[in-house]
Image: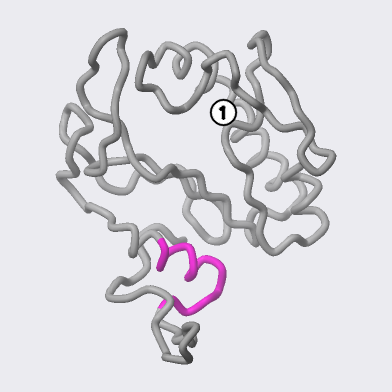
Amino acid sequence: MTRESSANTARCVNVPSPWLPHPGCRRHWTSVANRPRWDTPDGYSWDSHRSSNDLKNHLIPGFDQAYSALLTDLDDRGLLDETLVVVCGEMGRTPKKYGNWGRSHWTYCFPALMAGAGIRGGVTYGTSDKQAGFPIDKPVSPEQMSATIFHALGIDPHMRINDRQGRPVELVHNADPLFDLFS
């Protein structure tokens, strides 16, 4: 779906997770707008409260294959330089396991991947402590990430737009793009 949308000059493509199954995973497929959609009635989910084994054994390998294939395809077709690919969730996971390797919500540190649209490849920005619980170098706020996304898309993150009451507000308040991520 993403390949087809990007080839048809879509301005924005949102692929909700999970989308692509790992071969061999038992999945129930349903159709959303005539597109296969990966439903998870059997419990496999990125929401790993009970167990993270599904992540390790099924979801991460499938994501790795799909993400690398998408980037390779965009690059092969000359579209990666003008396409921004962002992968992130709304939070990270607790640094320490509980129960059967389950992990709860954690807002202090979470991963995000960015590629294309001038983002330098192979760069790790910032570091966390040994438990991946807290940033120790170059922490990034949601506002900074938003400013970086707008910048990569050629939109000034400090541009003012009118809200519903007609008042001018900045797209991103009090944050600059992470210019170190760009070539």
Q: In this rendering, would 16 be left or right of 166?
A: right
Residue 37, image x and y in percent? 71, 32
170 up-or-down from 13: above or below? below
How many marks can you see? 1
Q: Residues within 10 Å of mark 1 (few under 14, many from 20)?
A: some
Residue 156, image x and y in percent? 47, 79
Viewport quadrant of the N terminus = top right
Q: In this rendering, would 34 be left or right of 163?
A: right
Residue 56, image x and y in percent? 45, 15
* Identity of the residue drawn at 79% across and 33% down: 31
Quadrant in the rendering for residue 15: top right
Residue 50, image x and y in percent? 36, 15
Magenta-highlighted residues: 146-157
Q: What residue sits right under mark 1 in the picture?
A: 63
Q: In this rendering, would 120 be left or right of 7?
A: left
26 up-or-down from 182: above or below? above
Q: Nearer the viewer, residue 123 or 61?
A: 61
